[in-house]
């Protein structure tokens, strides 16, 4: 029993640090969905691009961890704005399915474009700080996990501040509530949408760098699975709801850690999708969402 | 009615002529093994594209987990021929039925979702099927099921393809098919008119899934192995590209899309990384400038070229 409890707590620590990365990616998903009702399939690949920006910043420019994460966030924000400008903006009034297909197309384009650019081989992310292992009784946590947790926390607090207390955040909330009414009130919708993409992409890029630090390895297809799982996290918390994405990310991370700890690590991807199907069937609005009746 | 039948007969005669021509060319060695493989791949892709078109194009339910059903078909038929030593024909039938049953079981709960959510749910289910197969040691797990005899011949693939095409073509013109089209046009309106929308959505999904199973069985018995890596989301995306390129809701469009893209990937087989870039750029440009695909939801017909013909098939 003691052994079980210890194992449980250990997986909880692993799960929360993994989950906070999912939460960072899920935040971008949820903001973009909230504002233009688009499942941005390419979001997972922005996270990959962020990881590469971080990688090149540390290896080529030789900067430390914090400048690297800032460079990655800025770079990914620009990539996000460009993608929105080229691929999504002309489709603003197209049918939903057409936009979804475009997003899948953009996602594959980024993945295979990166394979051409930087070769498909995984790269070793340099150790930006010496890993220290902390023992808390029988439990083990390392400095990477701590850094992930703290960075994720800082970013989420910053995001909450931007969305809830600044003028730009107010405009974002207005557009996601009712785009047409917001336009009538003199809000520049295109600018707000660009900003949302920039913010979401920056968060995903931070997640990418943190994963690089955590697992020490990045490759052009690394965004595929985490991207889908972050989407699951966003749906789990209630898509379009910012605290929901954070909660969904953490829950998903913990569930995955438990499944790989107690069952088998090969089933952890299936667990994420299982959660998705269950939540879609029983509470499609998500844990924090309200049910909206469909009107004809 | 009579006119349609006459037209069908003429079509079948044309197909027989094409078959005779291709088969003859394969026998005499005019078509080498590389192109023979690609012709068989084209036929398999046509089955997949046409069956996905039944779900996505005719019924308007956006499914992107087709590779999962293909995997089920590939593995079930392989178990039947390799593990149980039963005949290939039985394998094809059981593969079709088992993929159909799974499609029914999956479709029943998930088709209550719509739009984006259905897309993600089918994507997730496709991955779950693949991960489950990956974890079953009986069928080889991650290394795949090897030693499958090459029992798929050109004749098998070609005539099964023709049968599937005719089945779906006639299904579209039948009463249930019309119900599916009505659901695509407006689900709420169809519901109000007394159409049992769930029933027809599940019907279309089940049929589409079972044909994907057939295609999977043909696939694994041509390439000697069934491997989980052949049935990833990438394959679903391939099939989706074919359908969307040809035009959602157009059968001739799906067929053209399948032929076109299989040829493109055959030509690009030396540069696999370029293949996906070309696919994705095609997809983006298509959605930006011609979201209805090459043919829209119209069928390619003689009428299109102003050659008369009063058929409405």
Image (cartoon, coloured by chain):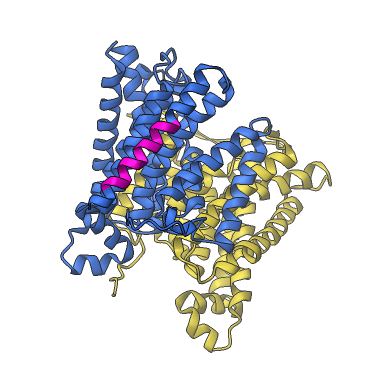
Chain colours: A yellow, B blue
Which picture quadrant has residue B127? top left
Q: What secondary structure is the stretch in magenta mostly built from? A: helix
What span is colored magenta in the figure? B5-18
Residue A116 in picture, x, y percent from top left: 72, 40
Residue B110 in picture, x, y percent from top left: 29, 50
Image side of residue A154 versus residue B229, left or right:
right
Compared with residue A67, is residue B277 higher up or lower down, i.e. above or below? above
Q: Between residue B178 and residue A183, name the one nearer to us.
A: B178
Q: Between residue A225 and residue B168, name the one nearer to us.
A: B168
Res. A207 in view:
no
Does B183 appear in magenta?
Answer: no
Residue A140 in picture, x, y percent from top left: 53, 34
Which picture quadrant has residue B14? top left
Residue lying at the far left of the rendered structure: B194
Residue lying at the far front of the rendered structure: B308
Compared with residue B37, is residue A283 higher up or lower down, i.e. above or below? below
Name the residue at 60% across, 74% down: A192
Residue A161 in picture, x, y percent from top left: 57, 70
């Amino acid at each position: 029993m003691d052994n079980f409890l210890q194992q449980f707590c250990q997986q909880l620590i692993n799960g929360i640090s993994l989950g906070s990365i999912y939460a960072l990616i899920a935040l971008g998903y949820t903001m973009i969905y909230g504002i233009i009702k688009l499942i941005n399939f390419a979001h997972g690949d922005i996270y990959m691009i962020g990881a590469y920006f971080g990688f090149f910043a540390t290896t080529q420019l030789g900067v430390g961890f914090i400048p690297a994460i800032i460079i990655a966030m800025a770079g990914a924000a620009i990539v996000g704005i460009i993608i929105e400008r080229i691929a999504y903006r002309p489709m603003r009034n197209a049918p939903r399915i057409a936009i979804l297909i475009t997003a899948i197309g953009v996602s594959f384009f980024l993945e295979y474009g990166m394979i051409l650019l930087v070769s498909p081989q995984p790269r070793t992310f340099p150790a930006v700080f010496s890993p220290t292992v902390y023992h808390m009784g029988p439990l083990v946590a390392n400095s990477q996990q701590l850094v992930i947790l703290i960075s994720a926390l800082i970013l989420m607090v910053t995001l909450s501040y931007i969305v809830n207390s600044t003028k730009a955040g107010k405009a974002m909330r207005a557009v996601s509530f009712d785009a047409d009414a917001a336009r009538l009130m003199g809000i520049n919708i295109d600018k707000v949408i660009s900003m949302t993409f920039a913010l979401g992409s920056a968060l995903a890029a931070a997640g990418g760098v943190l994963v690089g630090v955590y697992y020490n390895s990045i490759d052009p297809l690394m965004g595929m699975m985490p991207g889908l799982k972050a989407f699951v996290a966003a749906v789990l918390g209630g898509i379009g709801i910012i605290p929901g994405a954070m909660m969904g990310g953490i829950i998903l991370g913990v569930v995955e850690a438990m499944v790989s700890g107690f069952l088998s690590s090969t089933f952890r991807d299936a667990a994420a999708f299982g959660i998705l199907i269950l939540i879609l069937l029983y509470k499609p609005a998500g844990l924090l969402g309200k049910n909206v009746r469909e009107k004809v | 009615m009579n006119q349609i039948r006459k037209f069908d007969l003429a079509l079948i005669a044309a197909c027989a002529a094409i078959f005779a021509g291709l088969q003859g060319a394969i026998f005499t060695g005019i078509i080498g093994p590389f192109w023979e493989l690609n012709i068989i791949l084209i036929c398999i892709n046509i089955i997949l594209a046409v069956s996905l078109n039944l779900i996505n194009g005719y019924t308007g339910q956006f499914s992107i987990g087709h590779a999962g059903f293909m995997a089920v078909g590939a593995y079930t038929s392989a178990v039947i021929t390799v593990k149980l030593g039963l005949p290939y024909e039985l394998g094809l039938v059981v593969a079709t039925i088992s993929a159909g049953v799974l499609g029914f079981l999956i479709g029943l709960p998930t088709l209550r979702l719509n739009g984006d959510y259905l897309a993600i749910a089918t994507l997730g289910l496709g991955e779950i099927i693949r991960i489950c197969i990956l974890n079953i040691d009986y069928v080889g797990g991650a290394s795949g099921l090897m030693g499958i005899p090459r029992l798929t011949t050109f004749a098998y693939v070609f005539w099964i393809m023709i049968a599937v095409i005719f089945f779906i073509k006639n299904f579209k013109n039948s009463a249930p098919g019309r119900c599916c089209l009505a659901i695509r046009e407006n689900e709420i309106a169809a519901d109000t008119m007394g159409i049992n929308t769930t029933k027809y959505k599940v019907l279309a999904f089940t049929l589409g899934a079972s044909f994907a199973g057939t295609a999977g069985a043909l696939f694994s018995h041509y390439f000697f192995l069934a491997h989980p890596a052949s049935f990833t989301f990438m394959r679903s995306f391939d099939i989706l590209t074919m359908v969307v390129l040809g035009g959602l809701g157009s059968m001739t469009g799906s067929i053209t899309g399948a032929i076109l893209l299989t040829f493109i990937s055959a030509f690009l087989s030396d540069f696999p990384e370029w293949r996906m870039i070309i696919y994705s750029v095609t997809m983006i440009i298509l959605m930006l400038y011609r979201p209805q695909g090459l043919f829209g939801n119209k069928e390619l017909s003689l009428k299109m070229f102003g050659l008369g013909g009063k058929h409405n098939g």
